[in-house]
Image (spheres, helix red, strand yellow):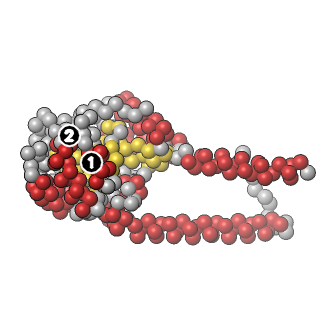
């Protein structure tokens, strides 16, 4: 009798624990950028499709990587070259601090033509460009016009990227961890652990790395451990699902996945009901089971 009275309370507590466990799951967004120049970049396709590729415009492999990513349902971004404080060569279509708004818009549109399926933009270098107001406003107005999102690589603590994006209503985020500016295994592991710490603390983390063979091998080894810790590897297409171009490009596939998942749930419920009915008449046996944000330093590639 006592057990029967306590049962609703026990069920309530268990439901609460399950709910807390679900909420504890945290999103890890990993972007590999600088793709487009090296044949070795293709090895990055061995990583889960939730890993996003950010491709440099007008590079020898830009079109090939963008097309192959699209075929496998992987989100890609435009890795837009921007002026660094050290004057390092930017590559094709780089944005400089002395450009007029029209020239910035033109370069971004031309860059997008070489990666036409890009759904977002992040800066390649840019410690000089992202710190000035007018240029970033011109850039982000065009990003908004094209329905894209913006990820600030944070190559300088003086960046105005996310601040201006928020004011203009552009979906945006900022890099929190650089994964591989040193390629020693101990350093990669240190950054990977920092990534997990931030994700557990904040509920999400944005990580930038590069398609170095060492990085690709490291991720192939360590990514499978995330799920056991309640961490979810998440595509930018899911994180920025509200961005117009993401919704247009990935919305239909997401709806189909949701429909399949719903159908699976209904099938499972039907199976459970059937099993319960069989158990009630003694035709089956009941089965039992045993029971710190990163310091915002200047980007290493500048």
Q: Kindly state the secondary structure of the residue where label 1 is placed.
A: helix
Residue 123 location, x and y as percent? 23, 46
Using a 10 Å C-alpha cutoff, classify the residue at mark 2 as few (fewer than 14 neighbours), some (14 to 19) or many (20 or more): many
Furthest residue in direction right, as rendered: 1
Q: Which mark is residue 137?
A: none
Q: Relative to residue 27, is residue 153 drawn left or right?
A: left
Q: Relative to residue 72, is residue 254 drawn left or right?
A: right
Q: Is residue 175 visible?
A: yes
x 86%, y 52%: residue: 4
Residue 104 location, x and y as percent? 13, 54
Residue 255 location, x and y as percent? 46, 68
Q: Which residue is mark 2?
A: 131
Q: Which residue is mark 1?
A: 164
Residue 124 location, x and y as percent? 21, 45
Q: Kindly state the secondary structure of the residue where label 2 is placed.
A: helix
**What's the distance in space between the residues labelled 2 and 1, CA to CA?**
11 Å
Image vertical order of residue 27 relative to residue 302, above or below = below
x 20%, y 48%: residue: 136
Q: Relative to residue 3, is residue 213 drawn left or right?
A: left
Q: Quadrant of residue 285?
A: bottom right
In primary-sequence order, the first of circles 2 and 1 is 2
Locate the C terminus and report the quarter of the image it occupies.
top left
Furthest residue in direction top, as rendered: 186
Whether tag 2 and tag 1 are in contact, CB under 8 A, the answer is no
Report the number of numbered marks: 2
x 35%, y 60%: residue: 243
């Amino acid at each position: 009798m006592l057990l029967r009275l306590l049962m609703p309370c026990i069920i309530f507590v268990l439901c609460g624990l399950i709910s807390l466990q679900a909420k504890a799951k945290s999103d890890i967004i990993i972007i590999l950028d600088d793709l487009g120049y090296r044949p070795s970049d293709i090895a990055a396709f061995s990583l889960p499709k939730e890993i996003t590729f950010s491709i440099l415009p007008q590079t020898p492999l830009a079109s090939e990587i963008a097309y192959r990513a699209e075929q496998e349902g992987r989100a890609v971004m435009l890795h837009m070259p921007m002026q660094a404080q050290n004057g390092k060569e930017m590559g094709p279509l780089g944005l400089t601090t002395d450009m007029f708004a029209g020239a910035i818009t033109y370069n971004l549109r031309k860059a997008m033509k070489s990666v036409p399926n890009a759904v977002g933009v992040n800066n390649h270098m840019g410690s000089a460009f992202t710190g000035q107001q007018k240029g970033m406003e011109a850039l982000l107005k065009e990003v908004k016009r094209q329905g894209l999102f913006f990820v600030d690589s944070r190559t300088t603590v003086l960046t105005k990227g996310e601040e201006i994006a928020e004011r203009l209503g552009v979906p945006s985020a900022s890099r929190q961890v650089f994964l591989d500016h040193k390629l020693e295994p101990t350093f990669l592991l240190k950054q990977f652990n920092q990534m997990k710490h931030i994700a557990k603390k904040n509920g999400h983390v944005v990580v930038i790395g590069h398609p170095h063979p060492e990085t690709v091998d490291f991720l192939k080894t360590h990514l499978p451990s995330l799920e056991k810790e309640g961490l979810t590897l998440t595509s930018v297409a899911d994180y920025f699902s509200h961005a117009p171009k993401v919704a247009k490009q990935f919305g239909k596939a997401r709806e189909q996945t949701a429909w399949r998942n719903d159908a699976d749930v209904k099938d499972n419920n039907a199976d459970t009901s059937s099993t319960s009915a069989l158990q009630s008449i003694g035709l089956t046996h009941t089965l039992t089971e045993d029971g710190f944000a990163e310091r915002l330093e200047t980007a290493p590639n500048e």
